[in-house]
């Protein structure tokens, strides 16, 4: 099948690789190079690098409303346009261009978590299951009819980073299955009106930890914001990132002294350092923190961090 592809970040790479292996990729759209790093030098997107390596025709329009963008698509003559985390709005004339339409891989089980941050929002909400949806795109925000869905359990150990990788691979396999189905008459079905939720873009301020909250909520915050923007607190005025943590509903029942310390401590107080974790009092329960990062430093295990900094009894916040 003649396929055009539109994508930008790493999430799109497994889908592009799958298409290159099984179909004729006639052209790739990706966003223009952007300044990155401390030097703010222009850098290519991951999708651009992959397209150049595969020697596929490439276009980087600022907008798909331009005549040049439409001319590129028309010249490629795709049967279908696959869109994966592209980042630009597709106007109606582009949506109508390929005979088989425009397909999108969305990292949730639509209609749950329409929007820009479905992976993080699913973890924050405590969802136990997510997945990918292959849909026919329309003019709405992730509102198009569904062609295929595949489910994935959210493990207690999943961060946004690890779940991102799992869903990217699942989406690539689901995409190939969908294209095979289209060739044999696979039909899309409308999204149900029930169960619609939205996943707005993550704001950096959301990563600030409020220790008065439930320990399980804070654990989800740590997992959802790893690798970006990373859950953050402060230790006596210095920022401290929390990269790995596990909720503990209550202190170990066999340790009576520790139970007393937990009950008397304010939220955010480090109750104890035990082995590879520090135990922090929350509004409800405690949080076992196992990995942290100070400003300008590498990430470090709490076991090592506690050798250089006295932690027990100090206040986070």
Image (cartoon, rainbow, N blue to C red):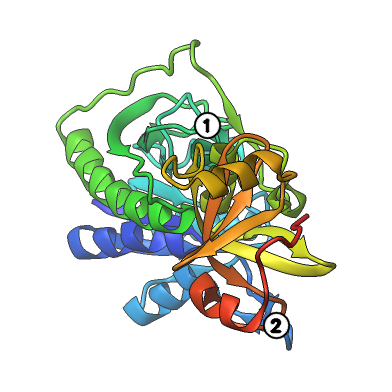
**Label 2 – label 1 distance at C-alpha:** 34 Å
Residue 135 coordinates in the image, percent (x, y): 39, 33
Residue situated furthest right in the rendering: 237
Where does the image place residue 56, in percent across and percent down from the top left?
A: 37, 72
Q: Residue at x 55, y 49 (%)?
A: 258
Pick the front one: 72 or 229: 229
- Helix, strand or loop at mark 2: loop
Element on which disc 1 rests: loop
* Residue 40 seen: yes
Residue closer to the observer: 187 or 120: 120
Please state, as top left, top right, bottom left or bottom right, where the C terminus lies in the image: bottom right
| Residue with the mark numbered 1 | 113
Horizontally, residue 87 falls left or right of residue 295, namely left
Q: Within 10 angstroms of label 1, few (less than 14), some, or many (20 or more) residues? A: many
- Residue 289, x across and y down, in percent: 54, 59
Which residue was labeled with disc 2? Answer: 296
Number of residues whose C-alpha sits closer than 10 Å to that of mark 2, classed few (under 14), some (14–19) or many (20 or more): few
Q: Residue at x 74, y 58 (%)?
A: 316
Figure check: 166 above or below 214? below
Q: Is residue 186 left or right of residue 45?
A: left
């Amino acid at each position: 099948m003649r396929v055009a592809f539109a994508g930008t970040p790493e999430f799109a790479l497994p889908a592009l690789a799958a298409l290159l292996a099984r179909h004729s990729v006639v052209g790739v759209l990706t966003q223009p190079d952007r300044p990155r790093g401390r030097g703010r030098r222009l850098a290519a997107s991951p999708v651009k690098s992959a397209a150049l390596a595969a020697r596929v025709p490439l276009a980087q329009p600022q907008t798909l409303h331009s005549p040049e963008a439409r001319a590129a698509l028309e010249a490629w003559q795709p049967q279908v346009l696959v869109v994966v985390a592209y980042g630009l709005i597709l106007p109606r004339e582009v949506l109508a261009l390929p005979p088989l339409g425009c397909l999108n891989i969305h990292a949730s089980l639509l209609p749950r978590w329409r929007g820009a941050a479905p992976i993080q929002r699913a973890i924050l909400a405590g969802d136990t299951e997510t997945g990918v949806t292959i849909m026919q795109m329309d003019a709405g925000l992730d509102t198009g009819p569904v062609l295929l869905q595949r489910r994935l359990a959210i493990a207690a150990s999943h961060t946004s980073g690890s779940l991102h990788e799992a869903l990217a691979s699942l989406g690539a396999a689901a995409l190939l299955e969908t294209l095979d189905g289209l060739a044999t008459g696979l039909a899309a079905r409308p999204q149900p009106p029930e169960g619609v939720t939205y996943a707005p873009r993550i704001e950096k301020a959301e990563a600030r930890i409020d220790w008065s909250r439930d320990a399980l909520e804070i654990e989800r915050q740590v997992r959802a914001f790893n690798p970006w923007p990373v859950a953050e607190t402060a230790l006596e005025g210095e920022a401290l990132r929390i990269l790995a943590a596990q909720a503990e509903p209550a202190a170990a029942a066999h340790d009576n002294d520790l139970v007393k310390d937990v009950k008397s401590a304010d939220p955010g107080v480090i109750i104890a350092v035990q082995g590879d974790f520090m135990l922090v009092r929350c509004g409800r329960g405690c949080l076992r923190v196992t990995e942290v990062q100070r400003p300008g430093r590498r990430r470090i295990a709490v076991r090592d961090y506690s050798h250089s900094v006295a932690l027990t009894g100090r206040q986070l916040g």
